[in-house]
Amino acid sequence: MSMSPTRILTRSAIRSDAVALAAIYNQGIEDRIATFETRLRTPEDVEQALFSRPARYPSVVAEADGAVRAVAWCSEYRSRQCYEGVAEFSVYTERAFRGRGFGHAVMAALLQAAADQGFWKLVSRVFPENAGSRRLLAGLGFREVGIYRRHGRLDGQWKDCVIVEKLI
């Protein structure tokens, strides 16, 4: 039996996705390669985080066979008016579906949704050892701007972050 999904569909995230999104995000927390967060999130936490923000900040999912497999969202970069066209983004893919096009699909959809909302740039930070995310973002035209050294601690260890950006 093929491990490939028949088709990857993208759409805006909805509140009923919260259970799946919490599970995917929690895998990112557990794997310790994608976020400084250490506290697992409940579906209610995810619902509050994604749906209490202004509608201008899109959240999208990628699904196959009726199940959500990846999520990407935008959030405020800085509150100053000069940055109103810049948003931070996050992207997470379910473990078993990494490297199979879900991250690419959800990020391509997020880039379009962000452009539709008037954003001109997306930025984020990636752990240097997260080769999969770095490949994904490079393939979508993100540029690595530099490295924040000792940007934060994770499990008592200092972690660097690669700064990425894309003009859209």
Image (tube, rainbow, N blue to C red):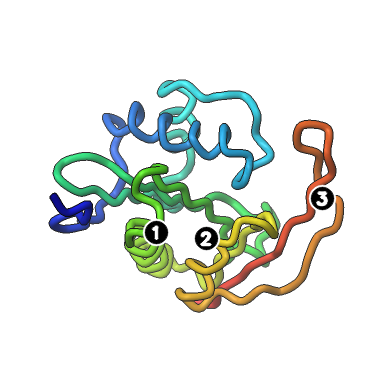
The part of the image, by quadrant, that contains residue 143 is bottom right
The part of the image, by quadrant, that contains residue 129 is bottom right
Q: Which residue is drawn at 68% across and 39% down?
A: 36
Residue 72 lies left or right of residue 6; in this view the side is right
- Give the SS element for disc 1: loop
| Position above or below: 40 against 37 | above
The part of the image, by quadrant, that contains residue 46 is top left
Q: Position of residue 106 (x, y in %)?
A: 35, 58
- Give the SS element for disc 3: strand
From the image, state whether disc 2 or disc 3 is nearer to you. Answer: 2
Q: Where is residue 124 in the image (x, y as percent from the top left)?
A: 62, 59
Would you say the residues marked 2 and 1 are in contact, meaning their CB atoms lie under 8 Å apart?
A: yes
Q: Where is residue 147 in the image (x, y as percent from the top left)?
A: 78, 65
From the image, state whether disc 3 or disc 1 is nearer to you. Answer: 1
Mark 1 or mark 3, which is nearer the start of the sequence? Answer: 1
Residue 47 lies left or right of residue 13; in this view the side is right
Q: Which residue is drawn at 27% across and 41% down?
A: 68
Disc 2 to disc 3, C-alpha distance? 20 Å
Mark 1 or mark 2, which is nearer the start of the sequence? Answer: 1
Q: Residues within 10 Å of mark 3 (few under 14, many from 20)?
A: some
Amino acid found under the numbered disc labelled 3: His
Q: Which residue is drawn at 55% across and 74% down?
A: 142
What label does residue 132 carry, if any?
2
- Which residue matches tag 3? 151
- Which residue matches tag 1? 99
